[in-house]
Amino acid sequence: MDTTTGASPLADGDGPGAAAARLTGRAVTGERRRSGALAEVTLDGGLAVMVKHGEGGGAVRAEAAGLRWLAGAGAVRVPAVLGEDGRWLVTELVREGAPTPGAAVRFGRDLAALHAAGAPAFGAAPPGGPEEAFIGAAPMRNAPGTDWPRWYAGHRVLPYLRRAVDDGTVRPREAADVERVCERLPELAGPPEPPARLHGDLWNGNVLWGADGEVRLIDPAAHGGHRETDLAMLRLFGCPHLDRVLAGYQEVAPLAGGWPERVGVHQLFPLLVHAVLFGRGYAEQALAVARAALSRG
């Protein structure tokens, strides 16, 4: 076996190669660590897979359920889940290429189709997915609701705001600006929308531009939500050819009027998650977009 180690071994009874063999029933011929949690494994016959380790708490089960739910829409492509056991997740390996304008337009169209596949409710977990899920390393609760402004405030904004205040990342007097946005969400949210099938953590690092010219999405925090939240996250952290992505999206499912002014409202969620995970800089961004939303309302 040709093995290149790029990180310290994973703290588990079996390694990524053994997990891949066990979950796929195929012999392993190669293994290369990418990080402490990821490894590329080559199986008998030349099939390359990605193996991811989870520390428990439902993260692996949530990710696997999310990938299957997104795949079930028949829209944006995702790596196929080849096996998971609650600690290990084995998926197809995506060979990456360069972003192109044509792929961006197709991605936009496919993302619109994914959102249109819908969800039973705002906050609905993927079938088989746990209610207590994750977005990155942060806990994320998938509790269903029927009213998007109330649900978004109660389950996507305020929990992370409270954690940031408790940690000292946001000062209590600053938190009042975000709380005012939550109070005014019914008027700031735009026209009512049905629950969309969201990727849920759609930053550029989770958008893989395949060598075959097609986009694939990885590492979802999938749930039922507002489609503008996925788009706002793409804008927040940058995405190649974003103008083409949005053009393709609008061809299939035009956004409600005034959507550019609502981007900041939808960015509050990921910014506060990042404030909890990474500190004050993201808290300041969250406060800035909250104040901008209040000034426009």
Image: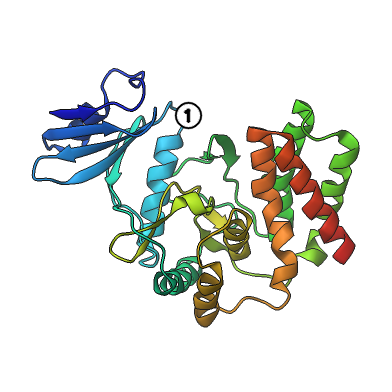
Residue 114 lies, in percent from the top left, at 45, 66
Image quarter (top left, top right, bottom left or bottom right) of the C terminus: bottom right
- Above or below residue 195? Residue 69 is above
Residue furthest to the left: 45
- Above or below residue 133? Residue 202 is below
Residue nearer the viewer, 66 or 297: 297
Residue type highlighted by circle 1? Gly
> In the figure, is residue 54 to the left or right of 154?
left
Residue nearer the viewer, 146 or 194: 194
Residue 230 lies, in percent from the top left, at 57, 59
Residue, x 57% and y 59% (percent of image)? 234
Circle 1 residue: 57
Looking at the rendered structure, the secondary structure element under dot 1 is: loop
- Above or below residue 84? Residue 259 is below
Q: Is residue 128 visible?
A: no
Q: Residues within 10 Å of mark 1 (few under 14, many from 20)?
A: some
Residue 244 lies, in percent from the top left, at 51, 74
Residue, x 45% and y 74% (percent of image)? 105
Residue, x 14% and y 39% (percent of image)? 43
Residue nearer the viewer, 187 or 236: 236
